[in-house]
Amino acid sequence: MVEFFVGTRPVGPAHPPLVVAEIGINHEGDPAKAHRMVDDAADAGLECVKFQTHVVEDEMVPNDVVPGNADEPIYAMMRRCALPASVERELKAHAEERGMVFLSTPFSRAAADRLAELDVAAYKIGSGECNNYPLIEHIAGLGKPVVLSTGMNDIASVTPAVAVLRAAGVGFALLHCTSLYPTPPELVRLGALAELGAAFPDAVLGLSDHTTSIYPCLGAVPLGARVLERHFTSDPGWPGPDIPVSSTPAEFADLVTGSRLIHAALGGTKEVLTAEQPTIDFAYASVVTTAPVAAGDVLTESNLWVKRPGTGELRAAQYPTLLGRRVRLALPADHQLSLGDLADG
């Protein structure tokens, strides 16, 4: 069975999905907002919160590129939102005090090394770094499991990344993702989960979702997703480029409950359960007389039919085989027929 551990939490097909609250940069660089989201996530029943670790000078060169979901250059945004190592250490301690796993996405070697110093349980790698094989190799070399988002990449470009993870011998999950903010439902493409599973049978599957609801995540569970990630905010009225695709604590609580319920409902075969017997007793129909029948009379459609409950010896499916047979003794109306009532037994 494919699985790995994030701390003590097993992740894999046999276990309920790990729901990851992607706080990311929704704190806008404000530690107080970040700590509030940790508490709100814990109160919602989440097991894991995830931030982003930006060491800007090691991550990018100065630039004026403006993301499609923002109104300022990415360089300025990251300098404004990057949290110092001391704050990340406090957030990790806070999350762990609340019983949650702290994860973060490193966007550079320096960021990965900072997280290694914090002894994080695993590393999340974003879609933009899915084909950044040198960085993936550096992160995988740190010896912890890796959760890799695969937005903006196809099977061909994911394959070298998986080869790096396999060579490092670390457990890994591949998250299908569409890197549009927000993602229209028709572009979520949950069918990609089967494609990833067929190409990489040793991977745990998951979904990193950027729609405006929790429904795609819930729909991904029966398709094999065991890591579910969405952006998280305490207040949908806060500013920030990811707020429009973020879910509230109440929505995350529903996602945790729903994904666990769906996981529990998976599997099994189409068979009659022993536990269904009390329902069978009242819901099935038995063969019964519909009029008094004298000894030696023939059973016909005028004196025999099927009625509930299902406590009789002969069930409705046997009705056609009983027509034309004789009874050996007189029977009253509404008598549940048994083989012992028949003259020819």
Image: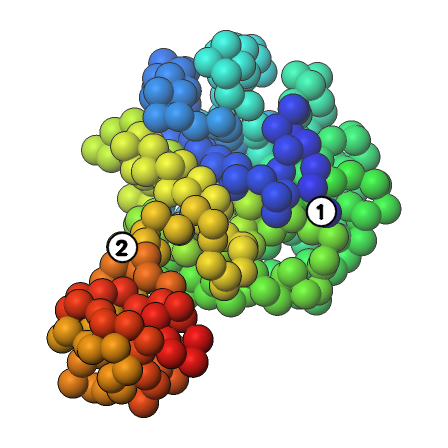
Is residue 255 or residue 110 the one in the foreground? 255
Scheme of image coloration: rainbow
In this view, the mark in front (1 or 2): 2
Residue at the image position 28 percent from the left and 32 percent from the top: 250
Residue at the image position 69 percent from the left and 41 percent from the top: 3
Residue at the image position 62 percent from the left and 38 percent from the top: 11
Q: Is residue 334 above or below residue 177?
A: below
- Callout 2: few (<14), some (14-19), or many (20+) C-alpha neighbours within 10 Å? few
Instruction: State the residue position of label 1.
Output: 2
Label 1 or label 2, whichever comes before in sequence order: 1
**Where residue 193 appears, x then y in whole percent?**
56, 61
Q: Which quarter of the image is occupied by the C terminus?
A: bottom left
**Circles 1, 2 touching at the beta carbon (< 8 Å):** no
Q: Is residue 59 left or right of residue 229?
A: right
Instruction: State the residue position of label 2.
Output: 282
Q: Residue furthest right?
A: 167
**Where residue 134 appears, x then y in whole percent?**
77, 45
| Mark 1: amino acid | Val
| Mark 2: amino acid | Phe
Q: Is residue 44 left or right of residue 203?
A: left
Is residue 3 or residue 112 the one in the foreground? 3
